[in-house]
Image (cartoon, rainbow, N blue to C red):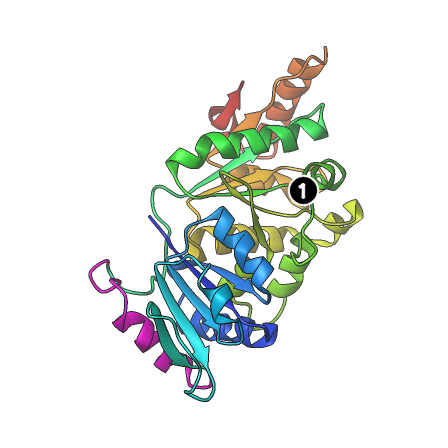
């Protein structure tokens, strides 16, 4: 699936998130959504990706809006007297989400491309790839990053590192972004909307997206196996990602069940003299508890 990108930039961060939430509750968005509450954040997004649609506040000066790059630019207005550029489309800010979506639909080619929304992206292309090492925690993160780069040609990739110490040292943290703790906290709310939490916590590398790991390594122990399964299901069924790469941490609850969900399991190479025997023991232990097909899934590199 070639997903469209949509950004919402408004100084009222609560409004931007609420607008994204309204669209998400309607149906699952067929967009990769970015929520920004500053011009600097918007410029960061534009450096990372091509924006197909942008909703931006009229509070940003005209001279600054001239520098904005997007295929279609919709400007939130409050009085109807705001000055607009020739390529901008006026949208009254305080109207229903349905009305705003009608304007978006009217000024786009989405009708010819199958509509604005989709309800379920699950297909034969969706894959869960696991990365596990019985001898090196750091190798799981670095190999997962490399695997995400390689798999980008096969579809949209989301990498989820769980070894906090290593991952937090490799990824430069954006202060505005959340982490896995925020994701699971959000999922525990009664009206969890995947389109909103992905928009606010997913970060980007050049070739793939990722979620920052738990800030404290101990936090992973507070997540149940059922919550991990729900997380995987949400990513594959309710988002535009076609490949989910999981850094399989031994501290994950009900870890064998995540192994069973994986389509492929990658074991990074190691110079440790016990590496091969520990890998074999790992396979045997999974077979003993009933996950016998795991041997066919393993990719030794």
Above or below residue 240? Residue 264 is above
**Residue in the picture at 24% in, 60% down:** 114
Quadrant showing the C terminus:
top right
In the rendered image, residue 253, in percent from the top left (x then y), is placed at 68, 46
**Residue in the picture at 69% in, 12% down:** 271
| Observer-nearest of 100 and 74 | 74
**Which of the 4 image quadrants contains residue 259?**
top right
Residue at far top of view: 273
- In magenta segment, residue 48: no
Q: Is residue 153 left or right of residue 128?
A: left
Q: Secondary structure at mark 1?
A: loop
Q: Quick check: can you spot residue 278?
A: yes
The magenta region covers 94-113
Above or below residue 94? Residue 87 is above
**Residue in the picture at 37% in, 78% down:** 90
**Which of the 4 image quadrants contains residue 11?**
bottom right
Q: Is residue 281 left or right of residue 54?
A: right
Residue at far bottom of view: 79
Q: Is residue 222 left or right of residue 52?
A: right
**Residue in the picture at 71% in, 39% down:** 163
- In magenta segment, residue 107: yes
User: Which residue is identified by label 1?
Assistant: 162
State the count of labels. 1
Residue at far front of view: 63
In the rendered image, residue 87, in percent from the top left (x then y), is placed at 33, 67
């Amino acid at each position: 699936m070639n997903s469209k990108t949509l950004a919402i930039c408004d100084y009222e961060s609560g409004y931007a998130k609420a607008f994204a939430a309204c669209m998400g509750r309607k149906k699952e968005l067929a967009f990769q959504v970015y929520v920004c509450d500053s011009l600097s954040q918007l410029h960061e997004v534009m450096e990372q990706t091509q924006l197909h649609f942008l909703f931006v506040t009229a509070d940003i000066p005209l001279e600054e809006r001239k520098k904005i790059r997007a295929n279609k630019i919709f400007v939130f207005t409050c009085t109807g007297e705001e000055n607009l550029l020739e390529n901008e489309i006026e949208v009254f800010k305080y109207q229903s989400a349905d009305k705003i979506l009608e304007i978006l639909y009217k000024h786009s080619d989405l009708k010819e491309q199958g509509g604005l929304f989709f309800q379920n992206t699950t297909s034969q292309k969706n894959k869960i790839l696991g990365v596990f090492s019985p001898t090196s925690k750091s190798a799981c993160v670095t190999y997962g990053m490399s695997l995400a780069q390689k798999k980008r040609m096969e579809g949209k990739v989301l990498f989820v590192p769980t070894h906090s110490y290593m991952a937090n040292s490799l990824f430069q943290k954006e202060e505005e972004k959340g982490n896995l703790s925020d994701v699971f906290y959000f999922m525990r709310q009664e009206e969890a909307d995947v389109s909103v939490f992905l928009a606010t916590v997913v970060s980007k590398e050049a070739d793939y997206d990722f979620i920052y790991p738990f800030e404290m390594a101990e936090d992973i122990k507070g997540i149940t196996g059922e919550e991990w399964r729900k997380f995987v299901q949400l990513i594959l069924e309710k988002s535009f990602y076609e490949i989910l790469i999981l850094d399989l941490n031994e501290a994950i609850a009900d870890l064998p069940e995540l192994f069973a969900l994986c389509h492929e399991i990658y074991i990074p190479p190691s110079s440790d003299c016990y590496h091969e025997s520990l890998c074999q023991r790992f396979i045997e232990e999974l077979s003993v508890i009933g996950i016998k097909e795991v041997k066919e899934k393993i990719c030794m590199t």
